[in-house]
Image: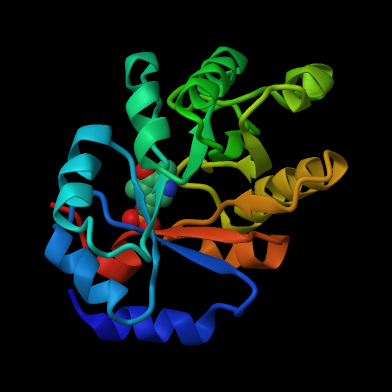
Amino acid sequence: MDTANYLKLRKQIPSNVNILAVSKGFKSQEIKTIQNLGQNDFGESKFQEAFEKQVILKDLKQINWHFIGRIQSNKIRKIVQNFKYIHSVDSFEKLQKISNISYEEKKYPLIMLQVKLSEDPTKGGFNPEFLKFKWIEIQNLKNISLIGLMTINPKGLTSRENSGLFKKCRALADSLQLPDCSMGMSGDWEEAVDAGSTWLRLGSLIFGDRC
Ligand SMILES: *Cc1c(COP(=O)(O)O)cnc(C)c1O
């Protein structure tokens, strides 16, 4: 890992856009190196892998942990206990379960709802129409703080196509009066910034290629 990559990104990315350093596949020592440069938000996509690093890094209290992976129902309690943010809530049933467990655990996770904006069979997420239909019910769930939407674009799109989907996500978030959009990864972050992303999820651009 070359810390110059991170420092260069910091300069390129507007200061009102948050960087989430996606550390899946990398070790706690590498997280420490980036944290030392002032990066406090780290994203992980598998609970067990993340938890092992959280235990090692427990004294670094400044770190905010974000869960960005597919949520297995039987891991929800552990995710609620150990993550401040959850970006990848992809169904109403999981959201309800997160709410109930957060109440029991006296937690208040910051939630972004994953939305499905294109026909990508490999990705889950709320259908935008269903989200609007359920919106009042969703807003009434206890012990969660809904802050935004999250989307993952399919691979292999043109820059224009990426922009189009990101703008859809931003417009939907605006219509629901949600401030945050978690969108943009190493290959499409520039389009995401232009469309109004507030959280870029950057892995390989910061840490290098995952093996
Ligand atoms: C791995 C991952 C990322 C980071 O991907 P890069 O292309 O390495 O930046 C972002 N978001 C999610 C949900 C991921 O699983």
The answer to whether residue 125 is visible is: yes
Q: Is residue 26 rendered to the left or right of residue 40?
A: left
Residue 20 versus residue 103 in the image, above or below: below
Q: Quadrant of residue 26?
A: bottom left
17 to 152, vertically: above or below: below
Instruction: Name the side, left or right, on which 153 lies relative to 68.
Output: right
Q: Nearer the viewer, residue 167 or 57?
A: 57
Which percent across, then down, holds residue 105? 45, 27
Residue located at (39% from left, 15% from top): 73
Q: Nearer the viewer, residue 201 or 32?
A: 32
Q: How is the protein colored in the picture?
A: rainbow
Q: Residue at x 78, y 17 (%)?
A: 137
Horizontal arrangement in the rendering, residue 134 relative to residue 94 (left or right):
right
Task: Say which quarter of the image contains residue 195.
Answer: bottom right
Query: Which quadrant holds the N terminus?
Result: bottom left
How many dots with numbers?
A: 0
Residue drawn at x 56%, y 59% as measured from the top left: 199
| Residue pictured at 38% horizontal, 79% vertical | 38
- Can residue 208 be seen here? The reply is no
Q: Nearer the viewer, residue 102 or 167?
A: 102
Figure check: 151 above or below 206: above
Name the residue at the right extreme.
175
Q: Position of residue 133 (x, y in %)?
A: 82, 17
Which x, y percent locates residue 29?
13, 66
The x, y position of residue 209, in whole percent, is 21, 60
